[in-house]
Structure formats: C-alpha cells, structure tokens
Image (cartoon, coloured by chain):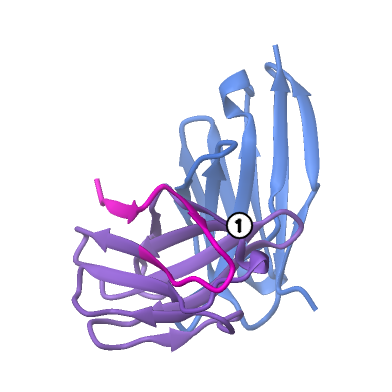
Chain colours: A purple, B blue
C-alpha cells in the first residue's frame, strides 16, 4: 500500500513565527500536493509539484511557500504564520490524470496563536 | 461558481438502509474520484472512476461524463459507514474537491 507520511502531527505556533510542515512519500509518484481543510470550505489546494525541483501555485497560495528537494519529500513553509492559517493540512501524492489515485497523509493540525 | 457540487450535504440513515450520494461537476473537470474521511481522520480513496460503473463490496460508483455527474451508492449501510464522503475532479493534474456529504448511520 502506498505510504504518505506527514510531520509533525500537531503543531502550535506563534503569530509571526516560521512553520515548516514536512511530507514524505514512498510511492515514487511524480505529483505531490498540499491541501488545507476548513469547515465550510472543504479541501483547498495550496501548492503542488510535478517532480523534484518543481513547485506550482494552487488555488490559495498566498502566505505559503513550497519546496520539493527530492522525489520523496515535499515541504510547506509558512514564513510568517498568522491565526488565519490555523487549519488541518494534508499532503497527498499521485497523478489524477494518469489514472493514479491520490494517497493522503494523516494530516497536520496547526494552531497559530 | 463552485466546480464540484455534492448533495445532500448531510444524510442520516438507519442501519440496513441504502444511500445515494451525488456529485455534479463543471465541464473543466474529469477523472472523478471518491474519498472517505472518518471524523478527524485522513482521506481514503474509494474509487477512481472517470466513466462508467465500478463496484467494491457494498459500494458502487457511477460516472456519466456527458451529464457531468457522478454518484456513490452504498447498499445495506452499517454504522461503520459513518463519516464524510468527498468527490473530486481533476484538471491538468490538480484535484478539486466538493464540500462532502456527512453520513450518519444509526444502529
């Protein structure tokens, strides 16, 4: 079974601080994604990547950066965290166009105080 | 407007009843997928179904691309089916999700 691992599982940050969320996949998938899930908004795409070295803006990229240093790892970076970024963040890997299902990590619950 | 619309928003069943969940999507999306999420949990892929009908146990997914709709049928529901069901469509590698249907199955 495909595996996507996120760390940390829970994070409390202060306003203005830097937060890095990490994601590792062992599926050898080219595509990786970062979503946030909020009540009333569902899942929204922040950034995604087509492979090592590439990052693309999703639907709500403002306030976030992404980094894909290798096939396996994809990070989401909040340089100056704000309370509005309090959410549950999910990482996923897969390629929905090439008949590959998406596999999700367990999520990171981030609270910015 | 919203590219993926799901209905109903919530549904309550008695154990043993059947459920039909609907997903309507815009013309820019295809490669429909269905996911299940337990409260506080991660998303688990149920079906990748770009067209036609697929079945897995008590679950059946039907996608009619020409009519821009996909459905998920749950037969003989069980309490363990409770959770949120989300559909999503793809566009150039990006997956867009609906807001989900919250299903509660009572014993």
Between residues B84 and A70, which one lies in front from this camera angle? A70
Visible in this render: residue B107?
yes
Q: Is residue A84 above or below residue A1?
A: below
Look at the numbered disc 1 and give the secondary structure of its residue: strand
Displayed quadrant of residue B70: bottom right
Between residues A79 and B99, which one lies in front from this camera angle? A79
Residue B55 position, x and y percent, is: 48, 41
User: Which residue, as the protein is rendered here, is positioned at the far top?
Assistant: B107
Residue A12 position, x and y percent, is: 51, 53
Dot 1 alpha-carbon crowd within 10 angstroms: few under 14, some 14 to 19, many 20 or more: many
**Which residue shows up at 45% across the image and 72% down it?**
A18
Q: Is residue A42 above or below residue B101?
A: below
**Marked residue chain, label 1:** B
Q: Which residues are magenta?
A: A1-21
**Which residue shows up at 62% across the image and 19% down it?**
B79
- Left or right, B78 with respect to A68, comes to right
Residue that mark 1 sits on: B87
Residue A11 position, x and y percent, is: 46, 52
């Amino acid at each position: 079974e495909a595996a996507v691992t996120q760390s940390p599982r829970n994070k409390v940050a202060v306003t203005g601080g830097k937060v890095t969320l990490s994601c590792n996949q062992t599926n050898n998938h080219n595509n990786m994604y970062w979503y946030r899930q909020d009540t009333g908004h569902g899942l929204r795409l922040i950034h995604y990547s087509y492979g090592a070295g590439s990052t693309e803006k999703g639907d709500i990229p403002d306030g976030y950066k992404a980094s894909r240093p290798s096939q396996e790892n994809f990070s989401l970076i909040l340089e100056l965290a704000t309370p509005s970024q309090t959410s549950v963040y999910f990482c996923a890997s897969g390629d929905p166009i090439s008949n590959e299902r998406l596999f999700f990590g367990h999520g990171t619950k981030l609270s910015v105080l | 407007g919203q590219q993926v619309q799901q209905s109903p928003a919530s549904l309550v069943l008695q154990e043993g009843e059947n459920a039909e969940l609907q997903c309507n999507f815009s013309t820019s999306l295809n490669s429909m997928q269905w996911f299940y999420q337990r409260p506080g949990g991660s998303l688990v892929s149920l079906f990748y179904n770009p067209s036609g009908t697929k079945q897995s146990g008590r679950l059946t997914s039907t996608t009619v691309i020409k009519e821009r709709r996909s459905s998920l049928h749950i037969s003989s529901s069980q309490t363990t089916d409770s959770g949120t069901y989300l559909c999503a469509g793809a566009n150039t590698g990006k997956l867009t999700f609906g807001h989900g249907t919250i299903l509660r199955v009572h014993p």
